[in-house]
Image (tube, rainbow, N blue to C red):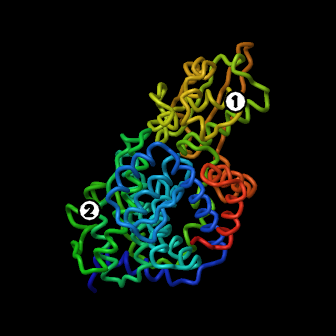
Amino acid sequence: MTTLPISLAFARNILAFSRRQLPEAAFVRARSAIIDTIGVTLAGSRHDGSAILRSVIEPTAAQGKSRVLGTDLRLNSLDAALLNGQAAHMLDYDDSNSYLHGHPSVAILPAALAVADEHGIDGQTLLQAYITGFEAVARLGSTVGRRQYTHGWHPTTTIGIFGAVAAAGVLLALNEAQLATALGIAASFAAGIKSNFGSMTKPLIVGHANRNALLAVLLAKNGHTAGAQAFEHPQGYFAVFNGGPDTYAPQFLTEDWDAEPRILDREKGVKQKRYPCCFALAPVLDGVLALRAEHDLRPDDIASVAIGVHAIRFPHINVPNPVDPLGGKFSTSYAVARALVQGAITMEDFEHESRFNDTATRALMPKVSLSVYERDNPSGATVVIRTNGGQVHERYVEAAVGTTHDLPLSAETLEQKFLNCAGRVLTPAAAEALLQRLEQDQYA
């Protein structure tokens, strides 16, 4: 029996999955994720980083039918995917996934939406393609495990690019051979390192992953070639990004994809964010804000705050002295201090110098410590707050609100999040009208 190259088996499963009759619950989950992602993209389009990228791209960009969200621009699909991809991740307010160890929607939707705009593709077809892209990144995430994440790669881009290839490839009706080639091309386009976390380059490379995924699909559709063994070659994707064969499990790509869609996984599916900062800070902030409200704590009451997280989370949020508000998205000391000062965390906390340099916030930051706890739970956090009066308040958060099927963000919270984000670009009435259209799968 001849063994198929992994890229071809991967492509075959992507196309077969895209033709599956999926449960309505999958479309409900996808619809929520897409609406949330469009909202944070609109908000992110107003960030300085997005404006800088537009100033570089727009003067030489070919016009087209694909929208650049948050603007009046309609550009070619490649540049629209780039600009929307960066804006979508600019605020770090977008969803996460524990198979991927990264952010699935911003790695899939900008490329898919650019194609849908260009070709007038309907909302239901876009939903199916999005779910297919989600399945692809979740299965590749299972294949490579935590290795890339812990080694310093940014899986949202090094894995996520293949989700965008899957979604765009389905929308552009590639055949198996063409899609296998697109996956092979993307294996050379995959990039992204975590040393750029806390800077504009983190979302920039997400934009490039979307653009490069779409470029790979278009090249393959037009007859470009790629190595048939792009994944399993001794110097292929698996070896380069993961290392030895004991660090990856290709069967997740090559076996039949007939199980429940992974977007419906109750523990690892779509994890939506309550706070516009690093996902690792979500359980921390849930605990801090709960204790603040429960015990009516005020900044002057605090003697110390001890935070414990899993070892896999520690490096990203161990930034005691961030250099600017954007860097504060990865700083436990800053985020905790802001939460204790104002009883909430908002987008403005990571944008405005006045908040970043607030006197009460600065006074609290040195009182916050971060350590690695011994629990085998990457999604949790411990919080111990000691007051000047000698009281000790403790909270263990097993999982942040929004991170599991059984602990979701409420419909009201998601709606308000969307309206707050969209309100940075649109009037309140226009934001409400947009939300109603999106809820009816009207993405054009």
Q: Residues within 10 Å of mark 1 (few under 14, many from 20)?
A: some
The reply, left or right, for residue 160 in relation to residue 438 is left
Q: Amino acid at mark 1?
A: Gln
Q: Which residue lies at the image location 60% right of the left edge and 26% below the top edge?
A: 306
For disc 1, the marked residue is 342
**CA–CA distance in space, label 1 to label 2:** 46 Å
Placement of 22 over or under 348, stated as above or below: below
The reply, left or right, for residue 81 in relation to residue 430 is left
Q: Which residue lies at the image location 55% right of the left edge and 45% below the top edge?
A: 279
Q: Which residue lies at the image location 55% right of the left edge and 23% below the top edge?
A: 357
Placement of 237 over or under 350, stated as above or below: below
Placement of 79 over or under 399, stated as above or below: below
The reply, left or right, for residue 434 in relation to residue 145 is right
Q: Residue furthest top?
A: 389
Indicate the secondary structure of the residue bearing disc 1.
helix
The label on residue 406 is none
Nearest-to-viewer mark from 1 and 2:
1
Quarter holding the N terminus?
A: bottom left
For disc 2, the marked residue is 188
Quarter of the image for residue 252 reads bottom left
Q: Picture coordinates of residue 95 (x, y %)?
A: 56, 55
Q: Which residue lies at the image location 38% right of the left edge and 45% below the top edge?
A: 201
Quarter holding the C terminus?
A: bottom right
Which numbered disc flags the more N-terminal residue, 1 or 2?
A: 2
